[in-house]
């Protein structure tokens, strides 16, 4: 098997288990993933086009009604919600591509190459973070054209952009676990049903008091709602400590719970 030039050059300078090899191989594979995603119409569509269209549709159809109901612009809830939805939908598309790479034997081919073992999974985490940042910036740009503004300063704006990254990486960990343990993409694609329920039953879709009282505790505390509330407080107004703490709890809890199964499953899938 002939190695790519980048890997041949790296083998002359450092062994495959060194820290420098991990960094270099991770960056190389991250570039590979980003280029592949950019050339894949489905991933590109779900990452950039669908979230922006969804934001425009929500603002056009129900934005005025919510503003009359609350007295405030609906964009400060819908922009965060759509940014989170973009992070989740892109993670599902990435999980489907991961399953296809495993079935095609690409993961196994990388496993037998003299590359750092941890670079495969690390590159997916880094590529996922880059994708979420681009998706969030696209949604914020469309929101700005519709009237969305940051009122809490630059530091709050930066944290606003980081919330979807953490939330999306936590969800991507769950999707990766599902993708490496199932031979079919139906399980991964079925996760979209969960994301749809999270979107429609969240405070980003309509205000909390618009829901029936019996379901309000569920809506108020579910992961997407607390993330939306935290991002709304960072961009406009509202309590920040509680929703941000719950967002960190939900996200870090998911990462801790699914990181080891995802790592073991990825390793097992790469050896097939």
Image (cartoon, rainbow, N blue to C red):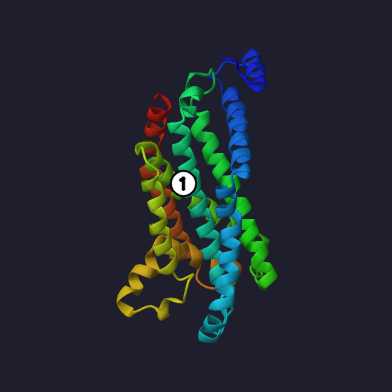
Residue 62 x, y percent position in the rendering:
53, 78
The answer to which image quadrant residue 224 occupies is: bottom left
Task: Identify which residue, 89 or 262, lies in the foreground.
Answer: 89
In the picture of the structure, the residue carrying the numbered disc 1 is 172
Residue at left offset 51%, top offset 65%: 81
Task: Identify which residue, 75 or 65, lies in the foreground.
Answer: 65
| In the image: residue 26, left or right of residue 103 | right
Q: Quadrant of the image for the C terminus?
A: top left
| In the image: residue 214, left or right of residue 46 | left
User: Outermost residue, right direction?
Assistant: 145
Residue 10 x, y percent position in the rendering:
64, 19
The answer to which image quadrant residue 173 occupies is: top left
Q: Quadrant of the image for the N terminus?
A: top right
Q: Is residue 6 visible?
A: yes
User: Outermost residue, left direction?
Assistant: 214
- Compared to residue 69, the image places residue 26 above or below, namely above
Q: Is residue 158 visible?
A: no
Indicate the secondary structure of the residue bearing disc 1: helix
């Amino acid at each position: 098997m002939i190695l790519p030039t980048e890997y041949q050059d790296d083998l002359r300078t450092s062994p495959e288990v060194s820290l420098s090899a991990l960094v270099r191989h991770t960056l190389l594979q991250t570039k590979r993933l980003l280029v592949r995603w950019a050339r894949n119409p489905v991933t590109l569509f779900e990452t950039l086009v669908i979230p922006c269209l969804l934001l425009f549709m929500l603002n056009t159809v129900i934005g005025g009604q919510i503003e009359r109901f609350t007295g405030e612009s609906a964009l400060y809830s819908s922009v965060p919600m759509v940014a989170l939805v973009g992070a989740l939908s892109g993670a599902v598309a990435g999980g489907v591509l991961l399953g296809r790479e495993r079935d095609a034997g690409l993961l196994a081919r990388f496993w037998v190459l003299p590359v750092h073992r941890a670079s495969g999974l690390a590159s997916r985490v880094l590529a996922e973070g880059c994708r979420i940042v681009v998706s969030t910036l696209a949604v914020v740009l469309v929101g700005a054209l519709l009237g969305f503004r940051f009122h809490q300063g630059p530091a709050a704006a930066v944290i606003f952009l980081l919330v979807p990254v953490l939330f999306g990486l936590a969800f991507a960990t769950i999707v990766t676990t599902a993708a490496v343990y199932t031979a079919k993409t139906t399980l991964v694609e079925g996760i979209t049903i969960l994301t749809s329920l999270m979107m429609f039953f969240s405070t980003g879709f309509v205000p909390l008091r618009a829901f029936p009282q019996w379901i309000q505790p569920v809506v108020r505390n579910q992961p997407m709602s607390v993330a939306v509330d935290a991002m709304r407080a960072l961009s406009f107004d509202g309590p920040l400590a509680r929703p941000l703490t719950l967002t960190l709890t939900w996200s870090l809890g998911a990462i801790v719970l699914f990181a080891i199964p995802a790592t073991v499953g990825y390793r097992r899938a790469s050896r097939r």
